[in-house]
Amino acid sequence: MRRYLALLGLLAASAAPAGAAGIQRYATTPPGRILIGAEVPPGASIFFVSGQLASPVDPSKVSSPPTIAEFGDSRTQTISALNKIKAILAAHGFAMSDIVKMTLFIAPDPKLGKMDFDGVNAGFAMFFNTKENPNTVARSAFQVAALAGPQFLVEIEVTAAKMK
């Protein structure tokens, strides 16, 4: 009985108050590029970032109508969209490490005849599971017929969360 009471006391002492737990990230086994899920506890601040498209590689050289070449391949567009997301998050007190969920919309690259998933993943890898940001995200990716303009190959939306 004393062992039971001691164990019960130990459990009670180690239990965190309901709102004190942090963001939980559940990795794949073995750890991979993305999470299997993330849990955001009550009391966390959550920020939803609308889908972001790439900026032109050189804004001074955009034709009418714009071309894919002026915005870059899927890797380049992924990096551009994630840099825009990074700036949006920073402006609202969040960081890339606070992202818990990402949705990727990927249009087919006319050069490949399909989405360039490898290119998107190469761009993604520059922002997650890095020295600067050891976190990764729960993520979904969809190939879509087209995005807002024919020059766009990638659109990314994210949800970030952090404890207040």
Image (cartoon, rainbow, N blue to C red):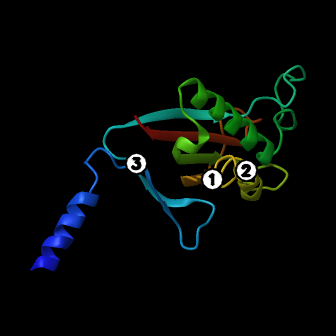
- Identity, as a three-letter code, of the amino acid under mark 3: Gly
Residue 22: assigned label = 3
Q: Tell me whether the residue at label 2 lies in contact with that at label 3, contact meaning CB atoms closer than 8 angstroms.
A: no
Q: Secondary structure at mark 1?
A: loop
Please provide percent x and percent y for residue 44.
38, 39
Taking the image as shown, residue 108 lies to the left or right of residue 31, namely: right
Against 99, residue 14 (above or below) is below
Question: How would you rate the neighbour count of disc 3 (Cα within 10 Å): few for under 14, some for 14-19, many for 20 or more?
Answer: some
What residue is at 65 percent from the left and 38 percent from the top? 147
The tag earlier along the polypeptide, 1 or 2, is: 2
What residue is at 82 percent from the left and 56 percent from the top? 112
The tag earlier along the polypeptide, 1 or 3, is: 3
Report, in whole angstroms, how far the alpha carbon at label 1 lies from the one at label 3. Answer: 16 Å
Please provide percent x and percent y for residue 163.
41, 39
Residue that lies at the very extreme toward the top in this rendered image? 60
Taking the image as shown, residue 36 lies to the left or right of residue 150, namely: left
Report, in whole angstroms, how far the alpha carbon at label 1 lies from the one at label 2. Answer: 30 Å
The residue beneath circle 1 is 134
What residue is at 74 percent from the left and 36 percent from the top? 80
Q: Is residue 148 visible?
A: no
The tag earlier along the polypeptide, 2 or 3, is: 3
Q: Is residue 26 visible?
A: yes
Question: How would you rate the neighbour count of disc 1 (Cα within 10 Å): few for under 14, some for 14-19, many for 20 or more?
Answer: few
Please provide percent x and percent y for residue 164.
40, 34
The residue beneath circle 2 is 108
- Identity, as a three-letter code, of the amino acid under mark 1: Pro
Q: Secondary structure at mark 2?
A: loop
